[in-house]
Amino acid sequence: MARRIDVTGAGGVRLAAWEFGDPPKDGADAVIPAQSTGERTGPPDTPAGPENRPGVLLLHGLMGRASHWASTARWLSERHRAVALDQRGHGRSEKPPEAAFTREAYVEDLEAAIEQLGLAPAVLIGHAMGALTAWQLAAKRPDLVRALVICDMRASALGAASQREWADWFKTWPLPFATLADVRKWFGEDDPWVERPHASRGEFYAEVMQESPDGWRPVFAPEQMLKSRETWVYDAHWEELAQVRCPALVVRGLDGELGRAEAQEMVRVLPRGQYAEVADAGHLVHYDQPEGWRTAIEPFLDSVFSTP
């Protein structure tokens, strides 16, 4: 079970954080505002969660949402305080048209979430864009970050061609989808970017759809996703990676977007970098192979939390 906790990000954007663990006695759907002190309001008999446990904050990638971390967060919550964040423009967080979707805004959101939730120093586990946000914060505010897990995110610049490909790809989506089964089939089989049937990819995208009067559409605005992406695809991020002083684990799926050579170079650049890979996994490593993902990251987390 997960309960929602509202936090306030950069520019006043409301962000939905989801704490995993035992549900509160009055139900798991209550919205609890986080205060700047890290304390949360609610009935006196509402459990505040395992506040005395080490904090882990999970960050989804572009177009993702906090619920994509459910399986990871469940086993983490057995020993840690596990929270997943819907980043701005995603999931249940606000998507104001006038909001900034810059790298600075995403990093400031994460900074605010850690402080308001009282998680510092937190272990940050990020997938794709979420991993970039995590290591940029670790470089900026080392006091807030205990360790990092970087999942399938490149440090190299992807370039203008990549951004054009994404803009063209969004145009191929046959919106609206009539049913969630149609969503699963298109993203798992019919999408031109799919080389072979990929059931978990279909499930991944079904989870970011919501029903509208004319069918199923994404919970995010594609134009906001492109705005978010254009703030990092043109630049390389090696310099910030080198500024990360905490332990960091770089994880890739063997069929993911992060190649082995670049991943190993990232490990070399990181002052305290380590490397792991997950077989039979693509870009959606934690979603494709949840057991392999756990096997890859759990020893690293154990070593981090066992160090005074």
Image (spheres, rainbow, N blue to C red):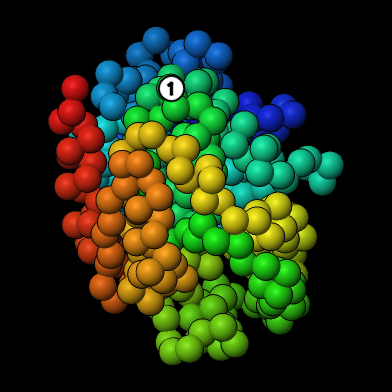
Q: Amino acid at mark 1?
A: Asp
Numbered disc 1: secondary structure: helix
Q: Position of residue 256 (x, y in %)?
A: 42, 72
Picture coordinates of residue 255 (x, y %)? 38, 76
Residue at point 22%, 45% (across, down): 300
Q: Quadrant of the N terminus?
A: top left
In the displayed structure, would residue 269 be above or below residue 29?
Answer: below
Of residues 156 and 202, the one nearer the viewer is 156
Work out which quarter of the rendered image holds the C terminus and state it. Answer: top left
Q: Residue at x 78, y 40 (%)?
A: 99
Image quarter of residue 259: bottom left
At horizontal 26% and vertical 32% (from top left) the residue drawn is 80
Q: Using the image, determine if residue 94 lies above or below residue 38.
A: below
Q: Nearer the viewer, residue 102 or 202?
A: 102
Q: Can residue 240 be spotted in the picture?
A: yes
Image position, residue 223 (x, y; %): 77, 60
Residue beneath the point at 63% across and 26% down = 8
Q: Is residue 181 visible?
A: no
Which residue, given by chain and number where applicable, does mark 1 sit on? 143
Can you give x and y, in whole percent of width and height, for residue 137 in the image?
Answer: 52, 35
